[in-house]
Image (spheres, coloured by chain):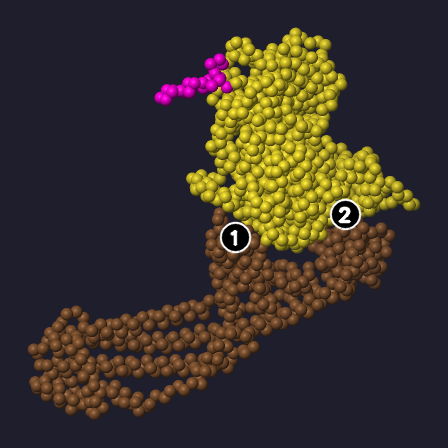
Amino acid sequence: MPISQFLTAPFKYHKLQTNPLPPTVAKFYKSPSTFTCISNPSLTLPLTHLNDDYCDCPDGSDEPGTAACAHLSPLSPPSPAQHQNPAARFNETLALPGFYCKNKGHIPLYIPFSNVNDGICDYEVCCDGSDEWAGVGGVKCEDRCAKIGKEWRKQDEERKKSLGAANKRRRELMEVAGRLRREVEDRIKTLGAQIQGQEVKVASLETELAGVERSERGRVVKGPGKGGKVAVLASLAKGRVGELAESLGRVRGEREAARERVRELEQILATFKEERNPNFNDEGVKRAVKAWEDYAARDKGPDSDPALDRDLDEILKSDAENGLNWEDFETTEESDVEVLYKFEEYLPKPVRDWVDQKLRDLRVTLIENGVLAAPHSDAGESKAVQDARQQLESAKKDLENDRKELTSHQEDLQKEYGPDNIFRALKDQCIDKDSGEYTYSFCWLGQTTQKSKKGGGHTNMGNFVRIEKVTVDEDVPPDGKGLGSGERYSLVYENGQHCWNGPNRSTRLILACAEKDEIWKIVEQEKCVYRMEVGTPAVCESAAASSKAPAAKDEL
Amino acid sequence: MFFTMPQPRSWTDVFLSFTALTSLFTPVVMVKHENFKTCTQAGFCKRNRAFADDVAQLTSWTSPYNLDPSSVSFKDGQLSGTILKTVGKSGETVRLPLTVTFLESGTARVTVDEEKRQKGDITLRHDSKARKERYNEASKWAIVGGLEISTGAALSRDTEAGSTRVNYGPAGTHEAVITHSPFGINFKRDGETHIKFNERGLLNMEHWRAKVEKPQPKEGEEPPPETTEETGEDESTWWEETFGGNTDTKPKGPEAVALDISFPGYEHVYGIPEHASSLSLKETRGGDGKYSEPYRLYNADVFEYELDSPMTLYGAIPLMQAHRKGSTVGVFWLNAAETWIDIVKSKGSKNPLSLGTKSVTDTQTHWISESGILDVFVMLGPTPKDITQKYGELTGFTAMPQQFAIAYHQCRWNYVTDEDVMDVDRKFDKFKIPYDVIWLDIEYTDGKKYFTWDPLTFPNPKKMHNQLDKRDRKLVAIIDPHIKNTDKYPVIDEMKSKGLAVKNKEGNDYEGWCWPGSSYWVDCFNPAAIKWWTTLFKYDSWKGTFANTFIWNDMNEPSVFNGPETTMPKDNLHYGNWEHRDVHNINGLTFHNATFEAMVERKKGEVRRPFVLTRSFYAGSQRLGAMWTGDNLAEWSHLAISIPMVLNQGISGFPFAGADVGGFFGNPSKELLTRWYQTGTFYPFFRGHAHIDTRRREPYVPGAPYTEIISQALRLRYQLLPAWYTAFHEAATTGAPIVRPNFYVHPDDAAGFAIDDQLYVGSTGLLAKPVVTEGANSVDIYLADAEPYYDYFDYTTYTGAGYHTVQAPLDKIPLLMQGGHVIPRRDRPRRSSGLMKWDPFTLVVVLDRAGNAEGTLYIDDGETFEFEQGAAIHRKFVFDHETSALSSTDIGTQGPKTAAFAKAMAKVRVEKVVVVGAPAAWEGLAEVAVSEEGVKESKGGRRAKVTFYPAQGVKAAWAVVRDPKVAVGKGWRIQFA
């Protein structure tokens, strides 16, 4: 039995033709004899009391088509308990979500009862104008659902399209963010290896420095009188050779590490080229890929010669293994010249040649060091110690830098970059908007600023401090540029420039899904406390997951 | 609040930074006393107070003012004569013309002028262009009626020697006894003296005298003492006064006017707003719990005013009423100059006329004005209603406001853009909180140029107005009297070229500083200025304003940032060459008046009731709109003081008053904000407002449970709008206050005379005692009589005179209904008051001890002046226990538009009748009989269902008549048994 049959009651306000019942509650109105208040079944009414513009049921269910029960609300001044039994109280919560606008040609919606028959056509909700069925004060609200519905569908289509694009864009951002994160992780790995190497190197340099210092001390202590010149020379040469061998070894290690890094980098770049999305038109990426291709195509020069490496291995064997016993030279009483001569003879051919050369250098060095010209000089730290120290310092510094970098990258990994690390992809990108007197801008995870059109520089409105979630409940305008209802990501920027007679400026960004990054609205909520409503694809899927799409059927 | 400065605006920054520094050394925020004068710093006050002290020292004192008996004449209800003031030892006299006019209303008016000044027979110093007369035009601004001369007043036949007696007033019950030497008047009612002029001999009219230039002291010599040789008077403040770096040139010399007025047998005096003080005025001559400064009336922009203080504030109404059991009398001191009033009370039985043995308290007052004529109206009551009525007949009744004006107003300094305004508007709807008006403070203008919109922040005022209009809402924009001195601003160009600005002492346009920086002030004393001002408000002149734009006048004391006491120099010149000194307290009214005039008809043929809020006011401002109590603080103490302040406005003829809900400066706690809304719902003018440095605090901001509780308070206001509107109508036709203190409602209940923390709404019997303290869970409410009082929300009954504890947790407003009334309501919540226009009514019939009740309801279109042609419904509802019937009768005034309005409202019905305190005999009653004018009875008659709810413990029995379907505008009768 349709509700309209109830509405033939002999009351002058009964002109209710356009207010059907919401399908979900229609069953309560089907009894042919009496009506039972939906939430208070102990109360029954004659059918003439339905929609007669007088509120009978404490839950308002007898007036689905009028404003008579609009006052039933926790927002209204309390009224005395109506139950005859003082201990009991009726259920006074409205049984219906509102007046049901069928909106044929559009979407059925509920409008608050307080808006029924108030003389205002609330087309935003009731496009069929049924909320003003009584025509109070002569108001007439024609049915506009055809037009409004068509417009809405068109916009809805666009919204959906836009949402699709936004989601796609978000996936792209996710990939970028993921890649950026992997880069950090990779770098951490690399740094780990590098630091290990550096630590070894520092340790060896420390040993070396200690050795040099000892030998230098030795040189001064031994003096020229003891053991003759050859012994001194042998001792020096021994130190020098050891030094050289060690340098050689280090250089070789470094070369290996460098080669390893180049290989790794080339691998990264190769993957990069392979995995990048060519549809994402980023000039920087394009340039990088082109440069990589050029690089890869170039002749890389000869691979290292394994023979030479073997030679080096040979050289780097300990002196004893090469048949060199420094002890002998340091303790014999032979003449200096002979010693020098024999010394050469003892060496294997490749070493002899190499040593020959080195000895010439050594001589220069000895002169430079004043060993030959002024063998008694013992003023200050010798160059050898200085060099050794310098190398150690430099190695320590490198190690320190690497460690710092590692820490910063590790911290970076701990930082919150939002859902799926998405803001990693946007970091430091900036968006502007003109609003009234100012141009506002925010940079993702950077700072927010304002600049007056009347002149003056940028004013810092806050620096990014954290990501939060906030619950919002806002209407979404037809263009979809609104926060809607539910939980939203929010970026908090604090400690901006100080306000005269106020706080330090601060800004809260509240993010909602949109096709592109855009500031929708800026409000100075109170002095120097700003709120930006921002559309961005970055929060799309999470938004879709946590709340309904805009303009859902039940708007109440 | 430590650093809260009045304004974060450019030019003041430097100045304020300095004050910020100085405030570092002040432990609490407080008014800057050094910016405002004490009596000692105002020469004329100091002189007259010293005079009073001297007189009090003397064992015998004879006032030197004598009425020349030969000059006395009486004609057509008016007595004339000349008072001779004896000056100095030589016996020289000054002639002071006296008139005593007896009005038909029973009010007597006494004026005293000074002949020499009146005739212009004086010379002014400094080649001043000022007028020579004492200012005599205050009545032109303040008085609009009630001046009909009494035809029955007559000289008494049994006049004794040395005095003249006049019988006047209703049935000749009043008598004025004018003694000649010294001059004095005793006003009697029914043979008993209620008011005495010059009882203490403090009458003082400082006559004009030429300055005697003394030889300049030679270097190294002591300057001679500044006293006149003849009388020994202190001359130091006669010719020049400097305060705060500003020197007043005083071209007319000393010209104060002062008089003592005594109220024998009266312990309480009320009135003389505006002060942040108790309703019952305190003594001002020092002592425990008393003030040591007189109450001051000198309209000023007092920053962060302090409470419990006689300091001056923004407005002045020099009306005082004295009250005691069985009698209320009043005096209206019509003077626009700076005025101080000393009050002392003396216990004892000095009054020879007092009978009985009880000790009697007399109240003696001393009125001191800087200049102008003496012009006093004397009203002899005998009830508080008579005072407000007679005073209203003289100065006008409250203008009947538009419906929206008495609903809720949402204000903030500032809603910063048109989008912001629309956003706030949407939020109210979203949270289902009703409101009618949103306000714009000064930031909407283009660089503080009034009549412009900031093109960047308010690019689309039309869209904004349209959105508001969709829900029948309004916008109020601020317009101040200071006009920016700048290029390319037609308003300043026109004002200057037409010569409509206030002039400085040289007669050139006076330039001072206010919000826009350098500014000029429109001189609304000038009829041409009013005419010009009117042109500025036309829709085609001020683009972007519409039929739903209304106006707020601020800073009209006037506030001048760099002037003495933040206002204009006293030697400035207004239209007619009156000195600013003479007209200062009226200045705000003249500006308010000009705006009112402009708002009546902005488009030819579109005549609407204006709504203009003013900060500064004077007697008569009630004809022009509403006032608010200025820049208060978000503190509990300011919430508390708002009640006596609003009550005082009510009994002083300007009842359309309210305080900023939430407190202007500072951030209220959520509890304070909630309690303030619960209090504000009882302000006749109900507006939430906030300073620019505060956080947002619209009702939807604080969240649960506060938002819900605030919404209830707002909806309570809307539910009771029919009662409020009826109360406004009563104010507009009888001068009765809209909210009323205990003494006004119960004039014979001596125990309640000083009560000023609870209030009655109109004649509805609604009695509220808002919670004004933190953390309260109950209040003690004072009941003055033995009638039953019922809790508004649950019908708990309180009976018996004295204090009753009413539970008041945060979500509860202590609100009672006195038995004996019928309270009209509209229960359906709507988005704005305009959308309630077609809603049905609920009548709450609250029975008294005898089982009777009555009440009234007034309805009109809420917008136009058609009610003046009878387009209104005015009903009286009576429940008579004898007949057990509730009936509605017409008490309206018929006019040409009555029928049309009745027709338009024909469908608006009474949907429900609630009878509180219903007789137990109704148990089992199922139906009532309904009859309605013009409706034919069907067979068996019309019936309506009734439900009876028996009493439960302290909760009264009540009954509900279900939809009697009677039209609110028709006569009808509901028969209960």
Going 57% across and 26% down the picture, which residue do you hit? B129
Q: Nearer the viewer, mark 1 or mark 2?
A: 1
Q: Mark 1 belongs to which amino acid?
A: Cys
Q: Secondary structure at mark 1?
A: loop
Residue at the disc numbered 2: B839
Quadrant of the image containing the N terminus of chain A: bottom right
Going 63% across and 24% down the picture, which residue do you hit? B136
Chain of the residue on which disc 1 is drawn:
A
Residue B541 location, quadrant: top right
Going 70% across and 55% down the picture, which residue do you hit? A93
In the image, residue B372 lies in the stretch drawn in magenta: no
Tell me if residue A406 can be seen: yes
Measured as percent of width and height from the top left, residue B854 is found at: 76, 35
Q: Which residues are magenta?
A: B211-233
Going 55% across and 35% down the picture, which residue do you hit? B510
Residue at the disc numbered 1: A528
Q: Secondary structure at mark 2?
A: loop
A165 displayed left or right of B964 = left
Measured as percent of width and height from the top left, residue B283 is found at: 55, 25
User: Which chain is the one coloured yellow?
Assistant: B
